[in-house]
Image (cartoon, rainbow, N blue to C red):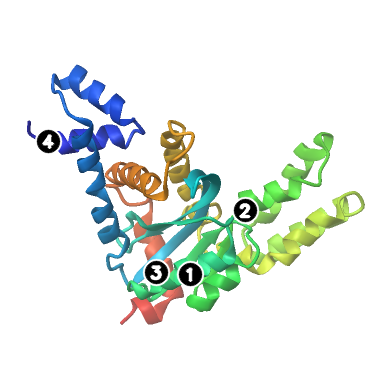
């Protein structure tokens, strides 16, 4: 049957068990397949994953998002929570690309991200214009250690969430409203004035919030150097969180993976299916690229 392997892998990428795949192949195509064939087809995916994970990368990525998600894997007879690390970049063409995925048994940490960034560098990446990350402690330092000229943009959505940890329910709507003038300002000076106004109103009740923003100010303000279309792309890690949500839908079918390879196979196939849909460049990309070129002339203007 033509495309038999592709059909098996398509069903597997949806999180189906071997038994479910056999049943679906019988029901949809009238084909009986053995459990051994399913295992053989899916096992071959590991070689594809190794080649994909070690493939050369482009020299320059204007934008890179980094994020992690938790998954459950049985390891040495016990259930463990592991972190799947993902790096999502935008190529100079404006198309998104997953640079790789990594599993770690420890919680998400800057030290492991440092090893990920070093691997990316060794695979050919010379420069990242701007890296968009959440508020993980030590994250900016890890990025700058490998890519010293990269600007680090903190996810504003994560920053707001962290700020609201200290706010009572009755004040949340007002606090969120008063934070908007900071990150929606036209310039850095306007943002600074908005932060001062916020502190004057709320420091008497929630002094921690303005301090959080001040502590992260260096990694909040890069977005003010770009026009609105680019700001909408870089002010949040929504792009990579959307990838995580897609993977999460597949993971819901598996309460626990028997081993790491099983998780990697399923996640890779789900990613592969997702990446096939990324055929259109990011909106307003040509304009965005011109700003990145002006900001990074040594990499773009040869």
Specify few, some or many for label 4: CA neighbours under 10 Å numbering under 14, 14-19, or 20 or more: few
Q: Which mark is residue 3?
A: 4
Which numbered mark, 2 or 4, is in the foreground of this view? 4
Specify few, some or many for label 1: CA neighbours under 10 Å numbering under 14, 14-19, or 20 or more: few
Q: Earlier in the sequence, mark 3 or mark 1?
A: 1
Q: Cβ–Cβ below 8 Å for labels 2 and 1? A: no
Q: Earlier in the sequence, mark 2 or mark 1?
A: 1
Q: Earlier in the sequence, mark 1 or mark 4?
A: 4
**Residue 224 in sight here:** no
**104 sits left or right of 49 in the view:** right
Q: Which mark is residue 120?
A: 3
- Element carrying mark 4: loop
Task: Tell me the residue that label 1 is attached to.
Answer: 115
Viewer-nearest residue: 195 or 261: 261
Which numbered mark, 4 or 3, is in the foreground of this view? 4
Task: Tell me the residue that label 2 is attached to.
Answer: 156
Q: Earlier in the sequence, mark 4 or mark 3?
A: 4
Disc 3 versus disc 1: distance between alpha carbons? 9 Å
Which numbered mark, 3 or 1, is in the foreground of this view? 1
**276 sits left or right of 125 in the view:** left
Q: Earlier in the sequence, mark 3 or mark 2?
A: 3
Q: Position of residue 62 (x, y in %)?
A: 41, 65
Q: Which mark is residue 297?
A: none
Outermost residue to the right: 204
Q: Position of residue 139 (x, y in %)?
A: 59, 66
Residue at figure coordinates x 44%, y 73% from the top left: 118
Can you tell which quarter of the image residue 289 is in? bottom left
Disc 3 versus disc 2: distance between alpha carbons? 25 Å
Q: In which quadrant will I find the C terminus? A: bottom left
134 over 142 or under it: above or below: above
């Amino acid at each position: 049957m033509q495309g038999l392997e592709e059909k098996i892998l398509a069903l597997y990428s949806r999180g189906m068990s071997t038994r479910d795949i056999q049943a679906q192949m019988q029901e949809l195509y009238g084909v009986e397949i053995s459990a051994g064939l399913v295992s053989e087809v899916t096992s071959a995916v590991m070689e594809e994953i190794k080649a994909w994970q070690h493939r050369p990368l482009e020299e320059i990525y204007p934008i890179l998002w980094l994020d992690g998600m938790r998954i459950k894997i049985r390891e040495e007879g016990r259930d463990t929570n592991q972190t799947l690390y993902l790096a999502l970049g935008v190529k100079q063409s404006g198309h998104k690309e997953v640079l790789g995925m990594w599993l770690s048994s420890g919680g998400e940490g800057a030290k492991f991200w440092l090893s990920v960034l070093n691997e990316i560098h060794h695979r050919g990446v010379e420069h990242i214009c701007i890296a968009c990350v959440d508020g993980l402690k030590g994250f900016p330092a890890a990025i700058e250690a490998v890519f010293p000229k990269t600007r680090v943009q903190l996810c504003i959505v994560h920053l707001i969430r962290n700020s609201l940890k200290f706010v009572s329910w009755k004040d949340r709507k007002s606090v969120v409203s008063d934070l908007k003038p900071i990150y929606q300002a036209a310039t850095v000076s306007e943002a600074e004035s908005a932060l001062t106004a916020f502190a004057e109103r709320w420091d008497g009740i929630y002094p921690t919030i303005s301090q959080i923003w001040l502590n992260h100010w260096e990694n909040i303000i890069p977005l003010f150097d770009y026009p609105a279309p680019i700001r909408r792309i870089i002010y949040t890690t929504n792009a990579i969180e959307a990838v995580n949500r897609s993977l999460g839908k597949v993971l819901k079918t598996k309460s626990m993976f028997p081993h790491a390879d099983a998780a990697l196979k399923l996640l890779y196939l789900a990613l592969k299916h997702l990446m096939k849909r990324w055929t259109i460049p990011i909106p307003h990309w040509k304009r965005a690229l011109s700003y990145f070129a002006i900001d990074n002339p040594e990499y773009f203007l040869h």
